[in-house]
Image: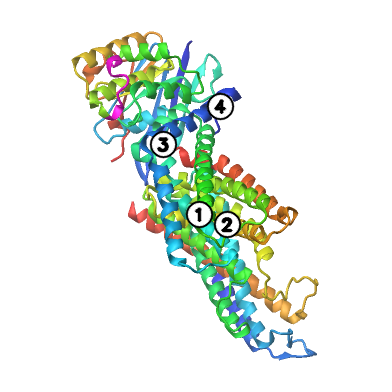
Amino acid sequence: MSRPMHNAEQWLRSALSIFKKDWHSEMRTRYAISALLMFVVTTISIMVFALGSESAPADVLSGMLWVVIFFAAMSGLARTFVAEEERGTSMTLQLLATPSAIYFGKLLFNLVLVTGVNALTVLLYTIFLAGFVVKTYSIFIWTIALGSIGLAASSTIIAAIIAKANTKGTLYPVLSFPILLPLLLTCINATRLATEGAFLSESFGEFQFLISYVVVVITASAILFEYIWKD
Amino acid sequence: MNLHFEAAGIKKVFNRRTVFENVSFSLNSGEILLITGRNGSGKSTLVKIVSDVLSPTEGKVIVREGERTLTDSRSSLLGLVSPYLQLYDEFSAEENLWYTIALRGKIPDIVHIRSLLKRVFLLNRKDDPVRTYSSGMKQRLKYAFALAHSPHILVLDEPTSNLDTEGTAMVKEIMNEHRDSGILIVATNDLSDVDRFDIQVDLNVAAHA
Amino acid sequence: MFKAVLFVWMTTIIVLALGLPMVAQPQAWYQFPIIPALGEKARIMFFHVPTAWLSSLAFVISMIYGIQYLRKKRMDDDNKSASAAGLGFLFCFLATATGAIWAKFSWGTYWNWDPRQTSIFVLLLIYGAYFALRSAVEVEEKRATLSAVYSIIAAVTMPFFMFIMPRILASLHPEPILNVQGKVEMNRTMLVVFLSSLAGFTGLFYWMWKLQVRTRTLELNRKY
C-alpha cells in the first residue's frame, strides 16, 4: 500500500518542491491570496459599519475574530487541491510525487497562507475595532499561532476530500465546521482569556488541547490522504 | 537493467459496470505491448492502472528485476504520455520540466532540461507559458515530461494525437530508441503508430458491455 | 422469530417504563423511586438515553465499516457503513427531540446550549455533512472512499469536543446512572427496566440495520 521512499532527503525535497510549485503558481495567478484578502477586508469593514459608534464587549469581539478567521479560511484554503482537479493536473502530480510528500507540501502551503492572512486579520481587527484590547500578548500570540496550525491541518484534509467530490466551494464549510468546532471554541476561549488579562499559565490547558488536536489531525490525515488521493 | 513487467487478472469496475476483466500479460525489457479496443473499451483506464495512478478493482501489476520484486513506486521507472495528462498552464515549458524533476526529489539540471526541449523541438518557445501552446505543442511537451527521468518503461496512450508529420517522426524516433533497451506499452487504434509489437491486448475481448 | 421476541420485549418495556408507579420509598418490587429534581419526568430516560446511545453506537459502527471498506474495497462494507449512519442520523434526531422536550419541562426552554445539547448538535451536523458529501459524489467507489475518510476524521476530532465542552460551559444535564458521586439513584427495578430498554433498543437498531442493508443491496442491484 504505502510507497516508502528510501531517501528521506529525496522525500523532503519533493515535499518542498510541492510547496514551491504552489507558491510560484499562486504568485502568478493570485487566486487564493486575493480571495482571502478581499474576504478579510470586506468582513471587517462590514463589522465596523454595523457597529457604528457602538463598541462591542471584548468577549463578543474575541468570538467574532474567529468567525472572520474561519470563513476567510473557507474562502481560500481549498484552492490548492481544487486547482489540481480543475486543471486535471492531479494525475501529473501522482506520477511525480508520493502521496505523503504531496500532503505535507500542500499542508505547508496552506499553513503559510493561513498564518499570513491571520496576521493581517489580527492587525486590521486591532486597528479598526477599538473594543478589542489584548492584555496578555503571550496568550494571544500563542493562540493565533496554534490556531492557525490547527486550522491549516483540518482544512487541508477536508480540501482534499471536496476536491475529489467535485463540489467546489459549497460543501467546504459544511464539512469543515464540525471538525473545526472544538478548535474554534478553544481558540475563542483562549482569546477571551487574553483580553481579560489572564496569566499565561492559566491558558496552558488550552494550549495543550490545541497541540494535541494538531498532532491527532495531522497524523490521521497523513494516513488517510493516500486513500483520497489515489483514484 | 532487465525488467519483467507482469499484469495478472486485472479487473476494473466503475459504478458496478465492469469495464474489463481478466486482463493479463507479461513483458520483458525489449518487448512492445500493444493495447487496442474500440472507444470506451477502457484503453485509457488500463493505461492508468499500468502506470499506477489508478487502482484496479481486482488483480495486480508486478514489476520484477531478476528475482527481486520492486516494491518501490512504479512511477520512478515509468514515463507516461496520455491525453488525460495535463501540465501546468501558467508555467513555461522550462518551468514545467524544472518542477517535473524537482517534484521527484531530484535536483534539476538546466542543461538536461534544455536538451529535452530541443529533442521535442520546443527550445525556441521554452519561456512561453504552456497556456499559449497549441495542442500539438502540448503533446510534444508531454514527451519531454515523460522522458525527463530516463524511465525504463514508456507508456504511450494515443502517441501521435494532435501531432504533425514532424511530431509523428519524433515519436517514431523516440519509440525506436526505447524499444530495444526498455519496455514499451502503446495504447492506440491507429496501427500505423507501431512498426511491430510482441504482445497484444485487445480490450474488445475483455470488455463487458 | 427475532422480530416476534423483539416486539414482545419492547412492548413489555414500554408498559413497565410508563406504567410502574413512582413512590418516595419503594417497598415492593414493582415500584420506582422518585429521583430528586426529576420526578415523573425521569421516565423519559428509558427512551431518551437509548436513542442517544444508539446515535453514538451507529457512528462507531459506520466508522468501523468505513475503515473496513478502505482496507478491502468491498461495496458491501460501504453499504453497511452508510446504513448505520442513516439510522444513526434518525436516532440522533430522536435523542435531540426527546431531550429538547424534556428540557422544556425541566429547564423551561427547549434549547439552552447545554454541553450535552451542543455535543448532540455537533453529532447531528456531522451526520448531515456526511450525507451531503455522499450525495455530492456520483461514482460509487469514490463516494465510499471519501465518506469513509470523512467519518474517520470526524471520529478522531469528536473526543476533543467531549473534552473541551465542560471546560467552557457547566452542564445541568442529569446523571442518574453515572454521576460524580458514583451513586446510582435508581433502584434495582428501575435499573433492570432501564438496562432492558437499552438492550431492546440495541436489538431494534440491529434489526433495522440488517433490513436497511438488505434493502439497499436490492436497490443497488436493480439499478445497475
Q: Are dots 1 and 2 in contact, CB under 8 Å?
A: yes
> Label 4 is found on which chain of the structure?
A
Q: Are dots 4 and 2 in contact, CB under 8 Å?
A: no
Instruction: Tell me which numbered mark, 1 or 2, is placed earlier along the sequence.
Output: 1
Magenta residues span: B122-131
- Between marks 4 and 3, how big is the CA–CA gap? 23 Å
Above or below for C53 versus B200: below
- Between marks 1 and 2, how big is the CA–CA gap? 8 Å
Assess whether residue B128 is covered by the magenta stretch: yes
Secondary structure beneath label 3: helix
Above or below for A68 versus B208: below
Q: Residue at x 64, y 44 (%)?
A: A215
Residue A184: give its label: 2
Mark 4, residue position = A11
Residue C12: give x, y in percent of width and height: 62, 82
Instruction: Tell me which numbered mark, 2 or 3, is placed earlier along the sequence.
Output: 3
Mark 3, residue position = A26
Instruction: Tell me which numbered mark, 4 or 1, is placed earlier along the sequence.
Output: 4
> Do marks 4 and 1 both belong to one polypeptide chain?
yes
